[in-house]
């Protein structure tokens, strides 16, 4: 990131290569639409470059990056036209099932195990998609992106205690929705 | 005479070690990366239904009973599989289904 | 500790985010409360399932192209903006040329590889990819005291992917050369071995 700040565009490409997939998966989980997730991810990295001089090396880059991503996702979710769109986490009757976010399980090449694993993963992704945005963000950042609670709090603009509360409510909601699968 | 005895002993050691099972490792023997991998797989295992877990237990027993070179062959094949691009992995699945039908 | 509090702390305990005194209090409560132990077991199952979800997703090529294109445009606009700023300031052309020449010299100096004595935090930070901190964070979740099942047979879990796919791996070469209905026999790649 310091090389990016010094004007090294090649370094920016490396940064994008390292963090792009994680950010894309994160935005996909938050906004629930693959197309919008790609647009938001594009906006995230343009903002990273535009405001690169605001990044302080004392801070964790991932925290700064996900803060930008979260703000853009929450803005996207608040847009009025958002409420008119079909919620892609639901599957309208008669329409072909969307695959949703890809759920590769590199270990499961047994079709039978792969099928049950995929079913659980799909149910889980749907359940996560039904969480309120901040719970979804807290869960994704801490469980899937490995951020410490303090960093999650920094990204979401809340205290560590609030992060714990968000996670508790999120897990509680997931347990209720996944009862038949677990 | 002495040389022949030593050579015989050396051959016996080589032959016996080729068939010897490697001693199972303890948690404390694992590197941090191996521990992380084992932990991740333990989590996956815990998420499986009971009958799948039993099936894996049975396979573990069979795998442990295999000679080391056979275990190594399976590990090499797994690495080869992991190296396949997604489309070829899918093709491999289809071939496996076909192979199962042909070999019932 | 009450059940209500204990259940709220289970996840944080799982993530290693509890102070040690709180952790001990939680463990004491769980040792005596069957209901909370059951809750923890179900939390465990959910967290295990979440951990199996993909963290990364393949990056569409068009997205990468779009981002890099936008960044190049932005960089060009910034350069143009700073060039116009110089002109607007009314600095004499000769002085501008002298400064530009100086800038070129400085930039070319920056392109030179840093010597060993100039290793700064810049290089350290640039060379230590932030993603490793995330990996290290995940690795810190590995408990020092593994569950008994894991401690008893770590080999089982090390080799779990192989066990799950044992039949395929035993007959890898034969499967790879099996004809499919379309008659194609694409090479499965790698260096498969049937012994």
Image (cartoon, coloured by chain):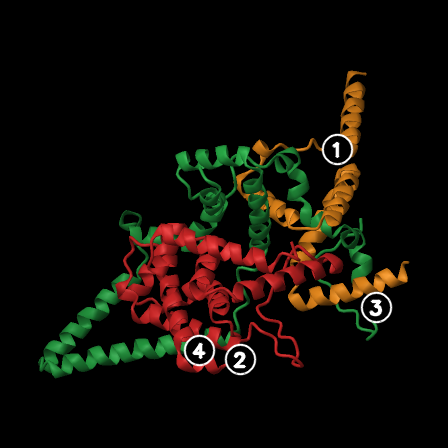
Chain colours: A red, B orange, C green
Residue placed under numbered mark 3 in the picture: C179
Q: Are marks 4 and 2 on the same chain?
A: no
Q: Are marks 2 and 1 on the same chain?
A: no
4 vs 2, front mark: 2
How packed mark 2 is, by other alpha carbons closer than 10 Å (few <14, some 14-19, many 20 or more), is few
**Residue A3 falls left or right of residue A168:** left
Please report the residue visible at 50 percent of the width from the left and 44 percent of the height from the top. Answer: C14
**Residue A144 falls left or right of residue C124:** right
Residue placed under numbered mark 2 in the picture: A86
State the residue in front, B15 or B44: B44
Q: Are marks 1 and 4 in contact (CB under 8 Å)?
A: no
> Mark 4 falls on what kind of element?
helix
Chain identifier of the residue bearing label 3 in the image: C
Residue placed under numbered mark 1 in the picture: B21
Residue found at the far top of this picture: B2
The image quadrant of residue C176 is bottom right
Q: Are marks 3 and 2 in contact (CB under 8 Å)?
A: no
């Amino acid at each position: 990131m310091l090389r990016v700040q010094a004007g090294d565009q090649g370094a920016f490409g490396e940064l994008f290569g390292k963090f792009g997939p994680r950010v894309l998966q994160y935005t996909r989980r938050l906004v629930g639409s693959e197309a919008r997730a790609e647009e938001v991810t594009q906006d995230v990295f343009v903002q990273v470059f535009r405001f690169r001089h605001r990044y302080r090396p004392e801070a964790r880059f991932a925290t700064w990056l996900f803060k930008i991503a979260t703000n853009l996702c929450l803005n996207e979710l608040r847009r009025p036209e958002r409420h008119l769109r079909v919620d892609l986490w639901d599957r309208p009757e008669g329409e072909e099932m969307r695959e949703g976010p890809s759920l590769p399980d590199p270990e499961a090449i047994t079709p039978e195990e792969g099928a049950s694993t995929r079913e659980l993963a799909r149910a889980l992704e749907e359940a996560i998609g039904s969480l309120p945005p901040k719970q979804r963000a807290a869960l994704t950042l801490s469980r899937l992106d490995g951020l410490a609670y303090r960093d999650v709090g920094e990204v979401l603009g809340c205290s560590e205690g609030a992060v714990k509360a968000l996670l508790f409510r999120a897990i509680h909601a997931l347990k209720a929705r996944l009862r038949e699968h677990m | 005479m002495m040389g022949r005895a030593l050579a015989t002993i050396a051959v016996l050691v080589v032959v016996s070690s080729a068939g010897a099972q490697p001693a199972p490792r303890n948690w404390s023997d694992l590197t941090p990366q191996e521990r992380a991998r084992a932990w991740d797989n333990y989590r996956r295992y815990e998420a499986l239904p009971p009958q799948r877990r039993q099936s894996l237990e049975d396979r573990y027993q069979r795998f442990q009973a295999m000679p080391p070179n056979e275990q190594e062959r399976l590990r090499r094949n797994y690495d080869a599989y992991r190296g396949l691009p997604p489309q070829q992995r899918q093709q491999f699945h289809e071939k496996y289904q076909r192979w199962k039908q042909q070999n019932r | 500790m009450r059940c209500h509090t204990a259940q709220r702390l289970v996840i944080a305990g799982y993530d290693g985010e509890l102070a040690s005194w709180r952790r001990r209090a939680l463990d004491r409560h769980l040792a005596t409360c069957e209901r909370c132990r059951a809750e923890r077991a179900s939390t465990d199952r959910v967290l295990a399932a979440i951990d199996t979800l993909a963290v990364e997703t393949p990056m569409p090529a068009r997205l990468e192209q779009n981002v890099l294109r936008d960044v190049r445009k932005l960089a060009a606009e910034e350069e143009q903006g700073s060039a116009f700023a110089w002109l607007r300031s009314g600095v004499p052309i000769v002085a501008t040329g002298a400064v530009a020449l100086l800038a070129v010299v400085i930039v070319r100096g920056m392109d030179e590889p840093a010597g060993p004595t100039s290793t700064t935090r810049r290089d350290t930070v640039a060379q230590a990819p932030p993603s490793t901190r995330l990996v290290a964070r995940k690795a810190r979740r590995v408990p020092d005291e593994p569950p008994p099942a894991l401690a008893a047979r770590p080999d089982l879990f090390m080799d779990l992917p192989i066990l799950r796919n044992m039949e395929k791996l035993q007959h890898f070469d034969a499967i790879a050369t099996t004809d499919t209905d379309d008659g194609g026999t694409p090479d499965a790649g790698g260096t498969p071995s049937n012994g």
